[in-house]
Image (cartoon, helix red, strand yellow):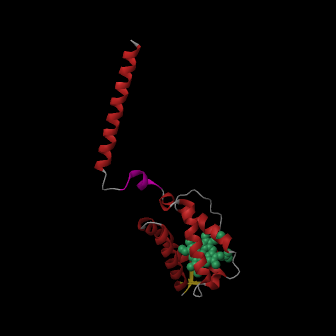
Amino acid sequence: MMKLITLKFFTIAFCALISLLGCSQLATKSNSSEPPKTNAQDSLFNRMGGLPVIKIIVSETIDEVSSNPKTSRSFKDIKLPKLKESVVSQICKLTGGGCEYDGETMLNSHKDAKISTAEFELFVSVFRESLSRHTNTREKNELLKILAPMKRDIVTIQ
Ligand code: HEM
């Protein structure tokens, strides 16, 4: 009797497993031309690779703009590790990573530096190059789109 119950249990469990597998395969097939749902719905922060990737991109960008003669003047006397931390928190927050950003507004933090359009554009192109090395095109464009409107607060001279 016991043997029969055990056999029935395993038969039912086996059938259930087969039908589940069948369903999941069907679902995968019907969506095969689209990116996986879990990834598509993920935050930009996660799709970029989270804090490790954001830290690399911010660090590379700030190292380059603070040493390039065309942009370096604003970074004289600025504590770069602290600045990097602040920019990382801001990007983490903006991309859905749940960080706290307790720095200044973009207007307040840049107004004394009198940043020109040319300096801003160089900054963005350095940032874009770094994004190209470490993220996919979709994530790169999404982040650049989030940062683009900041230009009007950051650039204060022609
Ligand atoms: C979309 C572009 C930019 C973003 C997202 C950005 C973001 C930030 C953030 C978050 C801070 C820190 C604010 C704080 O902690 O209170 C900061 C400060 C600073 N940024 Fe930018 N920035 C951008 C463009 C630029 C450009 C183009 C330059 C110069 C070429 C620049 C130079 C600086 C400097 C020198 C500081 C330090 C200000 C200070 O501590 O007195 N930034 N930026």
Residue 107 visible in the current orientation: no
Residue 57 visible in the current orientation: yes
The picture quadrant for ligand 1 comes to bottom right
Residue located at (36% from left, 16% from top): 4
Q: Is residue 122 magenta?
A: no
**Where does residue 45 sit, x and y in percent of width and height?**
51, 60
Q: Identify the residue at the far top of this view.
A: 1
Q: Nearer the viewer, residue 64 or 92?
A: 64
Q: Nearer the viewer, residue 77 or 104?
A: 77
How many marks do you count on the picture?
A: 0
The quadrant the N terminus occupies is top left
User: In which image quadrant can residue 82 be found?
Assistant: bottom right
Q: Nearer the viewer, residue 73 or 54?
A: 54
Q: Is residue 41 magenta?
A: yes
Residue located at (54% from left, 79% from top): 123
Magenta stretch, residue numbers: 35-42
Residue located at (67% from left, 74% from top): 80
Q: Is residue 154 above or below residue 17?
A: below
Residue located at (59% from left, 71% from top): 59
Left or right of residue 14: residue 148: right
Q: Is residue 96 above or below residue 69?
A: above
Left or right of residue 146: residue 63: right
User: In which image quadrant can residue 103 be found?
Assistant: bottom right
The quadrant the C terminus occupies is bottom right
Left or right of residue 83: residue 13: left
**Where does residue 19 sit, x and y in percent of width and height?**
32, 34
Q: Identify the residue at the far front of this view.
A: 3
**Where does residue 40 sit, x and y in percent of width and height?**
41, 55
